[in-house]
Amino acid sequence: MGKKEREEKKVERKEAKKQEKTLKKAEKKEKKEEKKEKKQSLKKTEKNSVKKAAKHQVAGTPVFAQSKEKHFTNRELSWLEFNERVLNEAGNPRVPLAERLTFVSIYQSNLDEFFQVRVGTLMVQMHSDEVIRDNKTDLTSAEQVQAIVKRVTGLEEKKARIYEQLMGELEPHGIRIINFNKLSVDEGKILEAYFDNQIAPFLAPFILDKKQPFPFLNNKELYALVVLEGKNGKKNSRNRIAIIPCTNSVFKRLIEIPTRPGCFMLSEEIILHFVGKLFPQYEVAEKSVLRVTRNADIDAVEVYDEDMDYRDVMEKLIRKRRRLSPVRVELTRQINPLVKKNLALLCGIGEDHIIQVKTPLDLKFVFSLQNYLREKTELFYPKRVPQNPVDLDISLPLIPQIEKKDVLLSYPFENFRSFLKLLSEAAVDPSVVSIKMTLYRVADRSKVIEALVEAAEHGKEVDVLVELRARFDEANNIEMSRRLEEAGCRIIYGLGEYKVHSKLCIITRKTEAGYSYITQIGTGNYNENTSRLYTDLSLITSNMNIGKEANDTFNALLRGETVNATNYLFVAPNCLQNKVLEYIDCEIGKAKIGMPAYIGIKINSLTDKDIMLKLYEASQAGVRIELIVRGICCLLPGIPGLSENITVVSIVGRYLEHSRIYRFGVDSDDKIFIASADFMTRNTLRRVEVAAPIYDERLKERVRHIFDTCMKDDEKGKLLTKDGGYVDRNLSDVKVDAQETLYEEAYEKAPKN
């Protein structure tokens, strides 16, 4: 072939590739349009069905279709109710003082993420061409944001009262956060010298004018906002705004006063006090510490580029997230209305999104305060250590034990080491041919990753699905995926429009008797750090039916698909919500013929409208329903004629309640599952989630006991009322703390090996 022909072929290939790319983009656009049309059609159908139901309402039929807003609460406002329960623990005198500091910091970090994700999404929707409404309360995005800002303003007042109370209670223990009013003249001079020598050289003040536009303010970093005016009343310069970054790795945030051990001042307050020294030509008219919270809700599809590696796409997403629009501005001091108006314009937000906060804008420094108190053990929770599991002898090989009986691990009461030991055994066991695993969030220095790397190095076939879209863990997951790939593991990243949130591990063995599976299905991530902080359940079984179906589920993911039918597992998006509804229907059927009927659900959030409507129907049929919902709950219990048979409890305690349990039926005929899925539409229909049945009667009794103990909790458990509020429970003279009870039992029952 001559040079000319080669060139022609090259041009042809290039043109063909270009046409193929154009075709793919057109197909993608067409699918997007179809999806939009389908969504609009579903919305229209739903509205028509509600109208039709209201029109044909007769006595004795369900009434929830008539007035949606009376029978559901808004998910965003329900979440704020949850975060208030976290804040209440910061003010709870029965919680050790140093631990209360943790809760006030968690409240703030929770709220930050809420604004970044949920409020960010709503604010994007506000600028959409169509009016988007909450399908449960009919509130528009703008109405929800307005309600959120109003509610948060009230919560910030409560946080300020609790923070002041905490600081006051720390003083008898030798810890004080002070301001300049409490310093002597000599101490003021010491801090001024500290500012001049240790802080000022590392500051970069920035005065705004026509040539210097408003700077980019990094998400959640601290800045000093200063209003400057000409000295001695000179009119040669109009008032100006200056911005000084206060977040710096060079100087410490928490600065101890040299003459007063245990007395501290925050670096941003020192900067604010001496800020005039940075602008000798001006007088400081007003000043405040400022912090911006930016939208962080980006869909990976939006930044997708088919010519890029998927990891590169996610890295691009992380970079883009850092520069998204502000959704909130916090100030520690009041500023005049004109400056506030200008600041809102510069940040591109409404003035109501500028919130005055009477506490430090970043509360992570409380963990440093805790370090000063470590020797005062009475100010902390009693030390708890995860115990050896009841179902395993960890001094012996685990695989033979699991082949004889199903195993249930309960975190943090039992240790995560036993699962790590199982992975390490599988890595070197000659009979193990492959390990398949889904990873959503892992620890920074993950021992799970180490075990998978070891397995690959021993010649095992290791297939790992790493979900790169685990929000705020993307960077860590990208790094882990590279490490696994370098070790020889086969890596896949998510599944198109579905996030893979399942907790699934399949160990395949081949022996003279044939092949077999060791399958692990859990409610929580493969993360040894959070296993000490979250309550979770993990089923490990050699059941072949479960193993085959779990393997089919994973193989579908390898093909970029989801399973359409299952017999044993619940697998979202196609085989979870429908199966839950079927099981609820079964209990409804029992109740209608006078048989005992019961539903018990333990989850983090409840927002799935189809499931809630079915639970209302079950309550009306006489089914007894107990729900343990830690966070968002859009369902309202106790409404006469609708939900009087439903009880909802939320537990906010020392450990984060994270295990998901589904119970259907009573006594020995009940069906019990543990799951990775909450009852949120995003989990039931838009993610890959797995729920596993518990068959062993011994393990079923353990799960029942865990559930029932949580239902008896009247120390940390709060009862949801029909108006959407939460109240204390008083079930007995001696308060029950479910988490403490379960830990005590773990100590009592732990095998001594």
Image: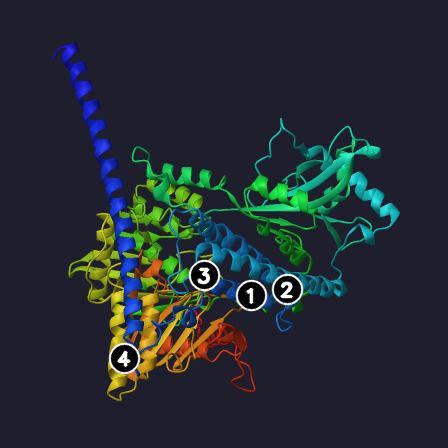
- Tell me the distance, in whole angstroms, between the alpha carbons under discs 1 and 4: 34 Å
Pick whichever of labels 4 and 3 is earlier in the sequence.
3
Q: Which mark, by number, is residue 84?
A: 1
- Furthest residue toward left: 1
Which residue does the numbered mark 3 point to in the structure image? 531
The C terminus: image quadrant: bottom left
Reply above or below: 131 against 90.
Answer: above
Mark 2 or 3: in front is: 2
Query: In the image, 307: left or right of 329?
Result: left
Tags 4 and 3 touching, CB below 8 Å: no
Query: In the image, 103: left or right of 285?
Result: left
Residue 300 in which image quadrant: top left
**SS type, badge 2:** helix
- Tell me the distance, in whole angstroms, between the alpha carbons under discs 2 and 4: 43 Å
- Furthest residue toward bottom: 594
Return the residue nearer the eye: 350 or 664.
Answer: 350
Which residue does the numbered mark 4 point to in the structure image? 587
- Tell me the distance, in whole angstroms, between the alpha carbons under discs 2 and 3: 31 Å
**SS type, badge 1:** helix
Pick whichever of labels 2 and 4 is earlier in the sequence.
2
